[in-house]
Image: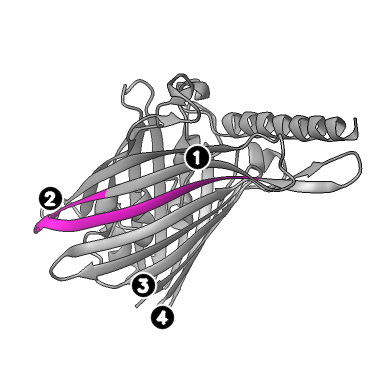
Amino acid sequence: MRHRRSSGSHLASAATFVLALAALVLSAHPLPGQKPATEGALFLLLPVGARTVAMGQAVVGDQPGSEGVWWNPSAIARADRREIAIHHSQTIVATGDAVTLIVPSALLGVLAIGANIVYYGRQEIRDTVNTVGVLIPQNIVYAATYATPVVKRFSAGISYKIVQLRLDCSGGCAGVPTVSASSSALDAGVQANLAGLAPATVGVAIRNVGPRLQVNDQSQSDPLPTRIQAGIAASVPQVHRSAPELDMRVTADLLDDMKLRAPSLRFGAALGYRERAFARAGYVFDRGNGEGDGPAFGLGVVAGSLVFDIARIVRGLSAESGQPPTYVSLRYLF
């Protein structure tokens, strides 16, 4: 009888945890103009990178260093220094860490590899008295990117990603359901420099194109959240002419799914001082009213080969719960 009570406790704990986690993730990150349940692997839409977040996630026309691997692969095509970076995020839902390495080559273009882990905490499995095991839910994305200039003012890039959704168990896990689902996806993007017409760059990226994420069988599979994002990044030369120590850059993007039914607007602005200190602000107009919807702000500092950025999203589930989403990026160029 004691064994049966313990197994029932295991199952109840696991089922409650999985349901609560699913409800929390879906409610925190609804999709613009859609019901979240129509797509799987919604963690692929979580923002990566403090600089990008501070700019309102308007980034596909910009060149944000290693953050570009996760937004528009072509953004790293003109990198001239190697870079290793970690992009950390903390929300009420999850903790994220994306590690990225960029290696430019005069002959081969620019290569990059990265891993993005979204961790949802640990859930103890208990019998009537003791902790006997631990449930560990996490999502993992591995990425390999290639980007290169095509002509003088045009760049292109592509990323291949392995996407994993995991619910692992450690310890006494008899009778506890676990989950291991995986899929693959492609990201592709282009950028064009408008020099001669305007001090601006335009970009287009399509992300998360791939087969459905299948958990157990075909009837329990969901399409990946494929998104198209187009935008522009422009310098404001009047600012530099008026104050030579200052530079200003503005960005604007449109994001939508493949059906182009409910575009999400994104805007950002950055003010730099001697290319060493930066203040950034942005806004996401998202009909889904998700975690990233609303204003964001951030700061950046460059000290030699080190680049440090921090950003916060002001509104959303985490902010309303007293824990505003915080994003920190540390990059080392060499």
Residue assigned mark 3? 245
Q: CA distance from mark 4 to mark 3?
A: 18 Å
Q: CA distance from mark 1 to mark 3?
A: 40 Å
Q: Nearer the viewer, mark 4 or mark 1?
A: 1
Quarter residue 182 falls in: top left
Q: Are marks 1 and 2 in contact (CB under 8 Å)?
A: no
| First along the sequence among labels 2 and 4 | 2
| First along the sequence among labels 4 and 3 | 3
Checking the image for residue 197, the label placed there is: 2
Q: CA distance from mark 4 to mark 1?
A: 34 Å
Residue 122: x %, y % from top left = 70, 48
Residue appearing at x 69%, y 36% in the figure: 176
Residue appearing at x 52%, y 36% in the figure: 293
Q: How is the image coloured?
A: one colour
Residue assigned mark 4? 304
| First along the sequence among labels 2 and 3 | 2
